[in-house]
Image: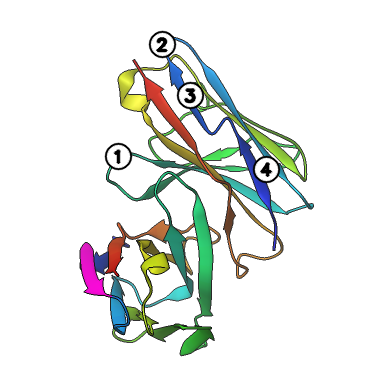
């Protein structure tokens, strides 16, 4: 069964700390992996998309890496700020599932001032 | 990137009634999707809304309960029919412009509570 797991479920850090969010997936035959941010009561904002042929993507203070062979992706957030507080979701599109995305359950991040 | 307007943003409904959620995209998009996010859980795909044809439903979701329309390349609706408290969730529409290897964009969601 194709599944996406995110650990930890919740994370609380002081402002300014660098942090890593983890995402693992059960089948390495992926098309792409996407990281999203969800604020309470809101929709999802796409942060980074990594194609299966790529190893990482960067946007500002965010860096996402992909290791297909081990079935893992990480989202690195540098110099965290209180405004980064949100739930971060990773989603995988597999070769056998076409355009459909399978989401992890998310990591709820709190950055304390 | 596409901007998606979704309404209503929230609603409280009585058991047995139906609610239609609308999703408008500011540009033509090839693919639109409807997701459900139950309390404390992640997103589950309900169906893919196909322009000019019937929607493609995922396992566990049926057209009679969740009829979907997609009259053109910028608009879609999802109806939650004959609602029960178990339908209380956030419903989100999303869109992708181009191939499946492109980013997925989301509306702001509809928070539905069924009494």
Q: Dot 3: few (<14), some (14–19), or many (≥20) neighbours within 10 Å? A: few
Q: How many numbered discs, if any?
A: 4
Q: Mark 1 or mark 3: which comes first in sequence? A: 3
Of the pair B51 and B80, the residue shown nearer to us: B80
Which residue does the numbered mark 1 point to in the structure image?
Answer: B39
The residue under the point 79% across, 52% down is B28
Residue at screen point 49% across, 81% down = A52
Give the magenta part as a residue range: A9-14
Quarter location, residue B73: top right
A104 above or below A32?
above
* Disc 2 to disc 3: CB gap under 8 Å: no
Q: Which residue is mark 2?
A: B14
**Vertical relation: B15 (above or below) A17:** above
| Label whose residue precedes the other's in the sequence (2 or 4) | 2
Residue B114: mark in rendering = none
Question: Is disc 1 in contact with disc 2, using a CB cutoff of under 8 Å?
Answer: no
- Report in which chain the residue with disc 4 lies: B
4 vs 3, front mark: 3
Point out which mark residue B50 bears: 4
């Amino acid at each position: 069964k194709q599944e996406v797991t995110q650990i930890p479920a919740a994370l609380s850090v002081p402002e300014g700390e660098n942090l890593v969010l983890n995402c693992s997936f059960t089948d390495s035959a992926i098309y792409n992996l996407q990281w999203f941010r969800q604020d309470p009561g809101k929709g999802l904002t796409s942060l980074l998309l990594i194609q299966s042929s790529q190893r990482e993507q960067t946007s500002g203070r965010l860096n996402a890496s992909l290791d297909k062979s081990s079935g893992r992706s990480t989202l690195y957030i540098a110099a965290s700020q209180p405004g980064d507080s949100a739930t971060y979701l990773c989603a995988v599109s597999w070769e056998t599932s076409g355009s459909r995305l399978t989401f992890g359950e998310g990591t709820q991040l709190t950055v304390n001032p | 990137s596409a901007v998606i307007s979704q309404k209503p943003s929230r609603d409280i409904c009585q058991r047995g009634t139906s609610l239609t959620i609308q999703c408008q995209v500011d540009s033509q998009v090839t693919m639109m999707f409807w997701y459900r996010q139950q309390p404390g859980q992640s997103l589950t795909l309900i169906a893919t809304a196909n322009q000019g044809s019937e929607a493609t439903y995922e396992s566990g979701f049926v057209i009679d309960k969740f009829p979907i329309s997609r009259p053109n390349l910028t608009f879609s609706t999802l109806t939650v029919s004959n609602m029960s408290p178990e339908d209380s969730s956030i419903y989100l529409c999303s869109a992708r412009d181009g191939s499946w290897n492109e980013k997925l964009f989301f509306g702001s969601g509809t928070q539905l509570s069924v009494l």
